[in-house]
Amino acid sequence: MHSISKMIIFLNGPSSSGKTSIAKCIQEKYRKPLIHIGIFVFMDLIHSNFKGVKDKKTSLGFYFTPKTINGNKVYSFNVGPYGEKIIKLAFKCMKLLSKGEIGLVVEEVISTEKGFANYLSIFKNQKVYFVGVKCPLKVIEEREKKRGNRICGQSRAVFSRVHPKKREYDIEIDTSKFSPEQCADMILDYIVENPKPGAWNKLYRKDL
């Protein structure tokens, strides 16, 4: 049984890299309740008519547009006017939750510097364990096809931007080599052995 004080575990990785499965395993294994949160939670609160490949309705919320990169068809993620309002609300809620007494497991696909800066700001001076969730693109695209609820090509569109070389993590895990349960144990064991995370605040200072 893992014994850890209140903290934020932040999982960053491409879509279909295994973040949600890891987050659920962490929640199951931890001795106290943890809130699983991220912008995806707020996206799920609106109707599917406002999410998907670009059309009249999805362009108001969250939509994907096709393009070609190196001969491969990919779908880039875009945010419409109501989607922007939802994201702002999500950040406000997550900031409020971070100031409470219950720990958080945050999962996100950070593909822009603006998005990363927003998270650095709302979790400033918090005890954050920053986890890089990695997986080869080939494996991710195989998962996209099998899952059926993902637009094939959406991960390829941002894959190179999610883990830029300058981004530091407290711990990195490769989900093509370990199960969600094993990844969760690796993260929790790391936290027990390292009571003071360093990557997040270091990145915050660099961003100033």
Image (cartoon, rainbow, N blue to C red):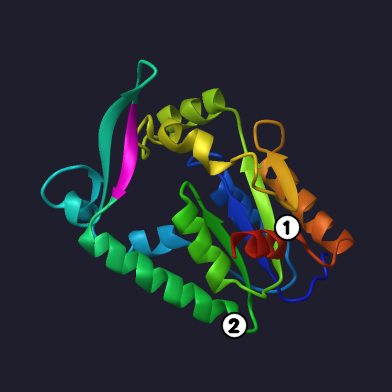
- Which residue is depicted at the point 45% across and 37% down? 158
> Who is closer to the viewer here, 19 or 14?
14
Classified by dominant secondary structure, the portion drawn in magenta counts as: strand
Q: Which mark is residue 136?
A: none
Q: Which mark is residue 99?
A: 2
Q: How many marks?
A: 2
Residue farthest left in this picture: 56
Q: Which residues are magenta?
A: 74-78
**Is residue 44 visible in this depiction of the protein?**
no
Amino acid bearing label 2: Lys
Of discs 1 and 2, which sits in the foreground? 1
> Who is closer to the viewer here, 208 or 75?
208
- Which residue is depicted at the point 78% across and 75% down? 5
Residue farthest bottom in this picture: 100
- Residue 18, position in %: x, y? 57, 43
**Is residue 61 visible in this depiction of the protein?**
yes
What is the quadrant of the N terminus in the image?
A: bottom right
Q: Is residue 75 magenta?
A: yes
Q: Is residue 4 left or right of residue 61?
A: right
What is the quadrant of the C terminus in the image?
A: bottom right
Q: Is residue 181 left or right of residue 2?
A: left
Residue farthest right in this picture: 193
- Which residue matches tag 1? 199
Q: Secondary structure at mark 1?
A: helix
Mark 2 Cα shell of 10 Å, populated few (<14), some (14-19), many (≥20)? few
Q: Is residue 119 magenta?
A: no
- Which residue is depicted at the point 75% across and 53% down? 170
- Residue 182, position in %: x, y? 75, 44
Q: Is residue 126 left or right of residue 59?
A: right
